[in-house]
Amino acid sequence: MKGMFFVISAPSGAGKTTVIKRLMRELPNAVLSVSATTRSPRKDEQEGADYFFVSENRFDEMIKNNELLEWAAVHGARYGTPRSKVEKWIEEGKTILLDIDVQGGKSVKKTFNNAVLVFLMPPSKEELAKRLALRGTDKPKDVKLRLKNAEKEIAASDFYDYKVVNDDLDKAVNEAKRIILRCSG
Ligand code: 5GP
């Protein structure tokens, strides 16, 4: 039995990282792909755990060498899914979680039509703005960009297989878990 891709996308501030952390704890067969990015690390982020932080030149090289399964420009930086690990996981029959944006979701679905796309929705625009401001990890200018992108991402997520509203963390995690368990059969 081959592995399967579960793409989890959400506007930033929708609680995606927390939901994914919980899913990783509660789904024994799940693995999480670590992306490469040209964005600079935030204060609490670790190389190889949160992202592989690479230079623009290295990212160009990864594209040229076909090292990325998909990649996209998001919020002014580039992000991509390294191919080698996920291909190994497919062979091992893993439940592969991809924390990627809607452009990445589209590419993955094109290549793997059995990939399951889950979009995590913030409860409201107001709540999203509040969470982004409270998080305090982004500069005000970046928060504004992320809010603008959130609206675009929500509008562009109509091709996703499932939408899960994160108004209550436990409920959202359980719903996502049920979807994953049902789809991975
Ligand atoms: P952040 O900068 O907040 O960590 O991530 C910004 C956005 O980039 C998020 O929506 C995240 O899901 C997306 N992202 C992270 N890694 C990848 C990737 O490898 N490919 C794509 N397409 N998007 C990614």
Image (cartoon, rainbow, N blue to C red):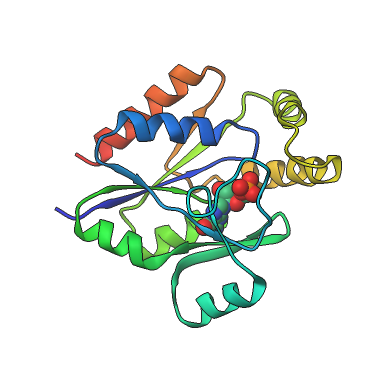
Give me the residue at 42% from left, 60% from top. 108
37 relative to 13, above or below? below
In the rendered image, the residue lying farthest to the bottom is 64
28 relative to 124, above or below? below
Q: Nearer the viewer, residue 106 or 41?
A: 41
Left or right for 90, reference 100: left
Image quadrant in which you'd find residue 15: top right
Left or right for 93, reference 71: left
Give me the residue at 58% from left, 75% from top. 58
Residue 99: x and y in percent read 49, 47
> Which quarter of the rendering shows the C terminus?
top left
Q: Is residue 128 visible?
A: yes
77 relative to 23, above or below? below
Residue 180: x and y in percent read 31, 36
The number of numbered badges drawn on the structure is: 0
Left or right for 35, reference 131: left
Give me the residue at 38% from left, 23% from top. 174
Left or right for 129, reference 166: right
Q: Is residue 156 visible?
A: no
Give me the residue at 42% from left, 42% from top. 161
Residue 143: x and y in percent read 78, 40
Residue 115: x and y in percent read 35, 52
In the rendered image, the residue lying farthest to the right is 141
